[in-house]
Image (tube, grey):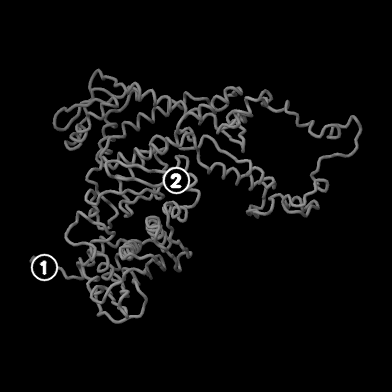
Amino acid sequence: MAVRRLSDNIVNQIAAGEVIERPASVVRELLDNAIDAKATRIEIVTSNGGKSLIRITDNGTGMSREDLQLAVERHCTSKLVDDLSAINSLGFRGEALPSIGSVARLSMRSRLANENTGWEIGVEGGQIFDPKPAALSEGTVVEVADLFYATPARLKFLKTDRAEANSITDVVKRTILGHPNIHFSVSGSDRQSAEYPSVTGDDATTKRMAQVLGDEFIDNGLIVDAEREGVFLKGISSLPTYNRGNALHQFFYVNGRSVKDKQITGAIRGAYMDFLSRYRHPVCCLFLEIDPALVDVNVHPAKSEVRFRDSGLVRGLIVGALREAISSAGHRSSSEGGRDMLGAFQAQSNPTGSAPSPSTHSGNQNYQRHGYQGQGNQNYDWQKSAFRPVQEEAPASHSGFSENPQQGFDVAAAPSADIRETEATQHLQALPLGAARAQLHENYIITQTDDGLVIVDQHAAHERLVYEKMKAQMARDGISGQMLLIPDIVELPEEDVNRLLDHAEGLEAFGLTIESFGPGAVAVRATPAILGEIDSHALLRDLVDEIGEWGSSDLVSEKVDYVAATMSCHGSIRSGRRLKPQEMDQLLRDMEATPNSGQCNHGRPTYVELKLKDIERLFGRS
């Protein structure tokens, strides 16, 4: 069969299959163009998950009639000259608009600031129409209707309108986070309207994170600010106790470009490896600034993946910066626990399940049922309350409150009666975790601070303390290898053997000694002693997989840490053990002095804190 040249329309449709995967891909490409046009205000409108309509309006520099004609042709762009090693714009391929026009109905209107009129051009299923005058203000309006109508097979593979709308929301969210200087407006029949005003100042990025991710993320975030060999990493990453079940809440930017890169995701996972289970993920928003010549963004048509010239440098920077931020948090724990506890109390005091009004005590229904008409503590008269203490005259033998209103609540009757108020305990109250007051259910320590109370899970807290001590010992004395009487011979493909041997020196630092045993096999001479008896074959196969995927061999370290965590769990204070007051206070002091003691080895909080103002609010005192 003779070789034939494909038509331009078929070429564009093939390109569309790579560049335009779904409606969210269209939104991403059009937003990149608007930002490259130096827009300060962008409006996004969608309908039916972007299948029926996508409209992006910006107030950028606009385009002339000639520019519009070129913009819908393949490989025409204003963002790139002849140097792929210095890409400073979000778009550069010149493929997006002709690809969209080949599978949808595309309309573009644009006007330059110094021109009296704008111009409009249309493309339908690859057919380009001549430009015509159009009335609009400075900027560009791009409208995409009936996406994939020209390729029905692709249309059938799209998900539901709701799923496609959610995917668009994710793209828009990532764009908004990366550009705090731009005002964004999002609306349409498939979503609620939202405005994201532009923010300025030194803390503009933090303000934008609060707009998109909420104040709770900021409250539970760790400041990340690091530099290594001219590469800068800044942003906020969450406390280990503030985590999610997937990595969708991780936002990473390279020179302002939002990327979803396996290498970066792996670095974040590696940084939190010591604090979270394998199935939990931190929330983060991080920005990497690097010389454009040291990063290749021309890796994938979607431009969501990048390749670094020195990937080890970038990975080391990410892991080191995140671990430093986590360590600097000390014993700090997530604020989610306290909020959840307050929510539980409020739910109990409001049986209907509806949220109480901020200005109304959740128990006012009971007060009103018994004749009290006040709101909160305004004009409150305890003598009129149905719940007032019994103060009537009574015989001397009456066992009520007539002689001593608080007689029934004598401190001596409390379970922790031997904890006395002394100058020493008053001093302890001023410390971050306060002074121990009681132990509940043989596992939870109640402490009093100057401005609230703390509930500590004694088992989870001590488990973390033991684990940190074990890690320090391992770092000080190293990990010894256990020599095998008969070396294990593991047969692997030759390329996998080469990968392992390239990392042999690093693996030996973890007690794993390997050497070549011919072109397709490895001899295992020693394994980490702390791991005990292991399956060398399974271990090496997992190592090869990780090295091939991430270019590193952190899995050995992870297995060692996992064993250390398991040992610390068995060596810690068990639930059900009653502690003396001195033991409880000592546990609190050790927590204050130990980094990362705010979470257990699995990422759960070791304590929750309630401020006095929150407690008073529960009882209508504030």
| Helix, strand or loop for disc 2 | strand
Which of marks 2 and 1 precedes in the sequence? 1
In front: 373, or 26?
Answer: 373
The image quarter containing residue 273 is top left
The residue under the point 59% across, 22% down is 582
Q: Residue furthest bottom?
A: 133
Say which amino acid is labelled 1: Arg
**Res 244 label:** 2
Residue 315 pos. (x, y %) = 30, 41
Vertically, is 154 above or below 495? below
Is residue 107 visible from the viewing direction of this image? no
In front: 312, or 550?
Answer: 312
Residue 550 pos. (x, y %) = 27, 41
User: How many numbered marks, from 0 up?
Assistant: 2
Vertically, is 614 above or below 354? above
**Res 266 label:** none
How far apart are the alpha carbons under marks 1 and 2? 52 Å
